Image (cartoon, rainbow, N blue to C red):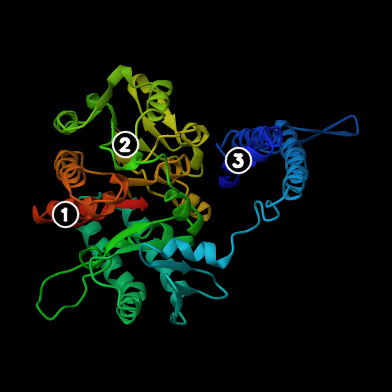
Amino acid sequence: MRDFRTSTDQLRVVDPTLAAEFEAINSDLEQVTMSMAPCGNMETEIIKVEDSWKTDPFSHLVAKQRQFLDDRKKLISRIRALPNFGNFLEPPSFDVLHSAALHGPVIIINHCKRRSDLLVLFRDSLSLVTTTDDFYSRAIELGDRLVDARKHHRLESKKYERALRSVLQSLYELVGKPVIEELRKLKIPEQSRVWWCPTSVFCHLPLHAMGPIPSDDGITRYFSDIYIPSYTPSLSALIASRKPQAEGKSFQKPSILLVAQPESLKHAIPEIWTIQRLTTTVTSLISKNATPSSVVEGLKHHQFSHFVCHGSLEEGKPFNASFKLSGGKQLTLLEIVRSQLPTAEFAFLSACHTAELTEESISDEALHLTAAMQYCGFRSVVGTMWAMADEDGQYLAEDFYKSILSSDEPGVPYYERSARALRDAVKKLRSKKVPLERWVNYVHYGA
């Protein structure tokens, strides 16, 4: 899918007509691919009619997609025949992929029955961290334990708290301990940025909050106390999130689009006021003014976006994940992915389930609202792994934006300050002695 939005800027200079053809076929392919999204109401059926076979609309879309792919392949061949375009859309080289770790180590977790690996990618090195023989099965057991606890116990219950605490401890023993040892061998300073690139079951395990980590001073610390953690669905996604924008644009104080539905959230009003009082331009789409079309249009004209509303998941239907808007309307993951958002930099999704995967969607790996925002162009995104306590939104937003808008970090784009700002805001939330699940919930994706 990401290849369907390949930049044609350089090609347009050399051959504008060919660039236009390539953009058009990519647009057609994206449309037909998204039309085939598994939303649960389209199944492939073959009906026998008078000894002939008639296929349903889904099969027609498959045939259409194949034709577009053939046409695209021919266009790529023509483009590669141009001078200096011989490597156009070739798989990225190792050197290119390695550039994902220029700003800090990327830890890739390969979870596979045949072989599982922990890979630490950092600047000029690639380290292989040995996993235990039971690594694969233990990871599955941890994932099952967390999903089962969420299914049978209320998030605020003591039983869920115990289950989550147990998972975090076991996750530290399985992944955190060997990774931290490797980071120290590589002399990665504490408080450095670190990115997790998980696969399989690890896509819905809270790697950022593993622990507690043993210490000599007796202070309880988790992974996010030692490093500033982020996630990325792939190395290519992380590289894309750092591509330069227009000169100086990312260093200007960003404008913010606020999308909020206070009717259904008891503590939404204080969070709305917090955003509206920020020392930057804020455009508000509140209640009935927030429609799917107005939100998508607003996203196109603001660098930052902040959502205060309910998020929802449908098991087995990942593209139906959505933000609940006024009048029962929904802004779905499918609509977000279809959007073109040229100015997007950062999104704060103060909504439930925005980075959560259901049991049925785990095979799709990082397919959720947070990843969709990143795919559409947002360079950094804050999301939630499960239902959030809406009373936390006001305090988290206040501390987060105070940090990100007032921090003096010359040469660092505002969106790249978001990981540290979230980590520090969550630490303040922890200091209020909130239950474990309430602070573990928040995750950062991207640059």
The residue pinned by badge 1 equals 435
Residue at left 35%, top 44%?
353
**Depth-wise, is mark 2 or mark 3 nearer the camera?**
3
Q: Along the line of sight, which residue is nearer the eye, 68 or 100? A: 100
Alpha carbon separation for disc pair 1 and 2: 29 Å
| Residue 92 position within the rendered picture, expressed as x and y whole percent measured from the top left | 59, 60
Alpha carbon separation for disc pair 2 and 3: 25 Å
**Depth-wise, is mark 1 or mark 3 nearer the camera?**
3
Q: Along the line of sight, which residue is nearer the eye, 237 or 382? A: 237
Amino acid residing under circle 3: Thr
Q: Along the line of sight, which residue is nearer the eye, 67 or 101? A: 101
**Depth-wise, is mark 1 or mark 2 nearer the camera?**
2
The residue pinned by badge 2 equals 304
Amino acid residing under circle 2: Phe
Q: Secondary structure at mark 2?
A: strand
| Residue 105 position within the rendered picture, expressed as x and y whole percent measured from the top left | 38, 67
- Compared to residue 141, the image places residue 273 above or below, namely above
Question: Does residue 332 appear left or right of residue 225 in this picture?
Answer: right
Residue at left 76%, top 48%?
77
Residue at left 31%, top 40%?
349
Q: Earlier in the sequence, mark 1 or mark 2?
A: 2
Alpha carbon separation for disc pair 1 and 3: 49 Å
| Residue 38 position within the rendered picture, expressed as x and y whole percent measured from the top left | 58, 40
The quadrant in which residue 161 appears is bottom left
Q: Which mark is residue 8?
A: 3
Q: Earlier in the sequence, mark 1 or mark 3?
A: 3
